[in-house]
Image (tube, rainbow, N blue to C red):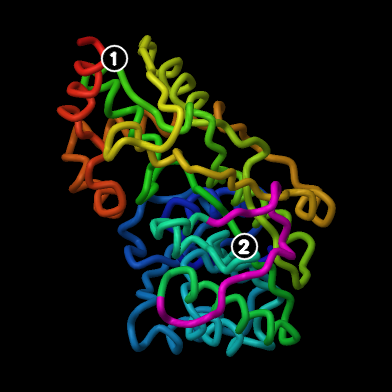
Amino acid sequence: MRKAVVIGASGQIGRPTVDALARDGWEVTAVSRGGGRDPAWDDGVRTVRLDRSADTAPSALSALVGDGCELLVDVVAYDAAHARQLTSLAGRVGSAVVISTVSVYEDGSGRNFDTLRDPEGFPAFPVPVPESQRTIAPGDRSYSTRKAALERELLASAVEFPVTVLRPAAVHGPYSPLPRELYFVKRNLDGRRRRVVGYRGESLFHPSSARNIAELVRLAAARPGTRVLNACDGETPTPAGIGAAVDAVMGVTTETAFLDGPPESSVGSTPWSIPLPVVFDMSAAERELGYRPVVSYAESLPETVAWLTDTLAARDWRESFPLLARAYPDLFDYAAEDAWFGERAA
């Protein structure tokens, strides 16, 4: 059997990637910090514990690959040092697929995902954004610059073995550390039947299902090559559409008030509400890999809603999703929303 090693196998993208490769006939080694403590996969998947941040990671990874494997998938590679870990395996790896991010892009004025919260800092991207769009300067200043450094190092060394770099956008699905759908799910669970959404609920922020990313990994594994591809869903739903879809899954009816412009402080601020469209061109993946999404956004929602419901039943949302809480500390400011509705009823 063809041998594949997946680093970061227990995470949001890693889980469906292991499943997709195993179904496609690969003998998969699932590598994660939890190792054998992670939920068991089907027969044919071996679990190995490895902490990517440990000083011993390079030698442990080398020992793991051993005499060689046909495919190395790295879901958690973060910077140039991680890229060098991968390229040091030249001669023992057939090809690699590495997850990057669309946050490496910047517009013609140098605005990017690092300047989002600056005055006039939101990037004005073409619609859709092709892979040829300019990218942020590599460095160690932020998540985006580190991912840019990862890409540059990988592509400069790609002569050693073929490397496909995938750039997902707003990743969604179970086990997400930043589940944007929580904005609607928690309100419904809390019995809130009114909500406010900025920008008329028409913002466009391209999502990436973890299952669709896994499909791109599977396709790239079957067609090794050195390339950079956007890794997004087949459609870009609006916040209004997402809210309606979540309501349908949860069987509730809500009233949504729309602001013509930006949120008023915390009121109307959803993780999907942005002033300019952020949509990515998927034609290269379609052309080079024959990519077709395996799931639509609406089709993926029941699984996500069920996972979020179970998670919230066990722990407070801030404890469960600290990254989301840091990014959106006032996501559930119900008092401010009630005051907003009260002012308009007066």
Badge 2 amino acid = Asp
Place of residue 184 in the rendered image (x, y in percent of width and height, measured from the top left):
35, 28
Task: Name the residue at 65% across, 67% down.
Answer: 165
Q: Which residues are magenta?
A: 123-141
Q: Which quadrant holds the C terminus?
A: top left
Above or below for 100 versus 235: below
For label 1, the crowd category at 10 Å Cα-Cα, with few meaning under 14, some 14 to 19 and many 20 or more, is few
* Nearer-N-terminus badge (2/1): 2
Q: Secondary structure at mark 2?
A: loop
How far is mark 2 from mark 1, CA to CA? 38 Å
Looking at the image, which residue sits at the far right? Answer: 287
Q: Main secondary structure of the magenta part?
A: loop
Residue 226 as seen in the image, left or right of residue 8: right
Which residue corresponds to mark 2? 107
In this view, the residue in front, 302 or 47, is 302
Relative side of 210 to 154, left or right: left
Q: Is residue 75 above or below residue 249?
A: below
The residue that appears at 60% across and 51% down in the rendered structure is 214
Q: Residues within 10 Å of mark 2 (few under 14, many from 20)?
A: some
Residue 139 within the magenta-colored segment of the rendering: yes
* Residue shown at 29% from the left, 32% from the top: 267
SS for callout 1 = loop
In the picture, the disc for residue 193 is: 1
Residue at 23%, 47% in the rendered image: 329
What kind of residue is marked 1?
Arg
